Amino acid sequence: MRILVIGGTWFLGKNIAEGALERGWSVSTFNRGRSGRDVEGAEPVHGDRTVREDLQRLAQHGPWDAVVDTSSSELAPRDVLLSTTALRDVARRWVHISTVSVYEGWPHQPLTDTSPLLECPADADETYGYTGEDGSPTIYGFQKAGGERAVTQVFGDRAVFLRPGVILGPGEYVGRLPWWLNRAKRGGRILAPEPSSQRIQPVDVRDVAEFALDQAASGTSGGYNVAHPDGLAFGDFLAECLSVTGGAGKPVWTAPDVLIEQSVKQWTEMPLWRTHAGVWSVDASRAVAAGLRCRPIVDTIRDTWAWLEADGRPVDHPRWADHGIAPEKEAKILASLA
């Protein structure tokens, strides 16, 4: 089995490349060579996927049984179309890492794999779409939906779309779980969102990587929601963060309307917290039936803390700074609740 991983040097892409090598596959990676190190044992090809000449040079390293695209999150649909067109004749199938943000109903409504998608042309530029007044839909969602359409236009039923919500685990670059772990370690009174019984569905990066590789080797097509089928209550999530870090903290469970009143930004200042009904109501049964296996979320928490304790250093990414409430703001809100 020969695969090409677009990306392949950090977090999900790195796990996919390493996992493929462990299976005895031949692996090529394609990236600009700016973030992370090339995976040992893979054939690295450096270039810019938005440059036609670089893609033509990449195609000369084919053919591949599958392309796994992990790096389209910041791309306009027309750039995804450029990549798929350039590689159409040297790839048997295309596994595209997408997002639940492509759904019309996200995050307000429960989702299945057949929920309607946002409309976006395959050749749209980076300006297509809009962000709603309440933060949904998003330009990002429109752009990713257009990227899916670009892949479908070229690869048809040879394409698979994996639509995760939140991916956590060792090597995380966004900073959601690392923030909660570091906050738990600091201890004291910890601002936490009610209800503590709310179940969350993040998936481990290693489990997403294994599922992506399974799909690369299969003959399936279409979209899969990639979410934890069991989930974990937020209270248990925070309790595990406190346990694994040894933090002497006490959660102060606070009503959502109070947090909103205090201008706490959902999803960023309070990572993994969002009041919309559908955000943690994602049906992943089709993926589970196709082989998705998710380790317990407590294992992801423990392994991520072990990585951080071993001086784990994520690739520098601007989204890291967006996550977590400032200590001064948290202290002010906690004081008002006393």
Image (cartoon, rainbow, N blue to C red):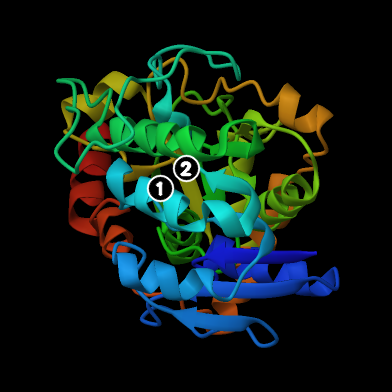
Is residue 149 visible in the rendered structure shown here?
Answer: yes
Direction from residue 24 to residue 46 in the image, left or right: left
When the figure is inspected, residue 16 is found, relative to residue 199, above or below; the finding is below
Q: Which residue is mark 1?
A: 190
Q: Quadrant of the C terminus?
A: top left
Residue 305's spot in the image, x, y percent?
A: 60, 68
Residue 244's spot in the image, x, y percent?
A: 65, 62
Residue at x-position 77% and y-position 39% = 292
As helix, strand or loop, the secondary structure at mark 1 comes to strand
Task: Count up the numbered dots.
Answer: 2
Q: CA distance from mark 2 to mark 1?
A: 5 Å
Asked whether 165 or 144 is in front, the reply is 144
As helix, strand or loop, the secondary structure at mark 2 comes to strand
Direction from residue 206 to residue 201 in the image, left or right: left
Mark 2 and mark 1 in contact? Answer it, CB < 8 Å.
yes
Is residue 243 visible in the rendered structure shown here?
Answer: no
Residue 274's spot in the image, x, y percent?
A: 38, 29
Direction from residue 290 to residue 311 in the image, left or right: left
- Which amino acid, by three-letter code, is at mark 2? Pro
Q: Quadrant of the N terminus?
A: bottom right
Residue at x-position 44% and y-position 76% = 57
Residue 192's spot in the image, x, y percent?
A: 41, 38
Give the number of the disc on residue 251: 2
Choose top left, top right, bottom left or bottom right for residue 128. Answer: top left
- Which amino acid, by three-letter code, is at mark 1? Ile
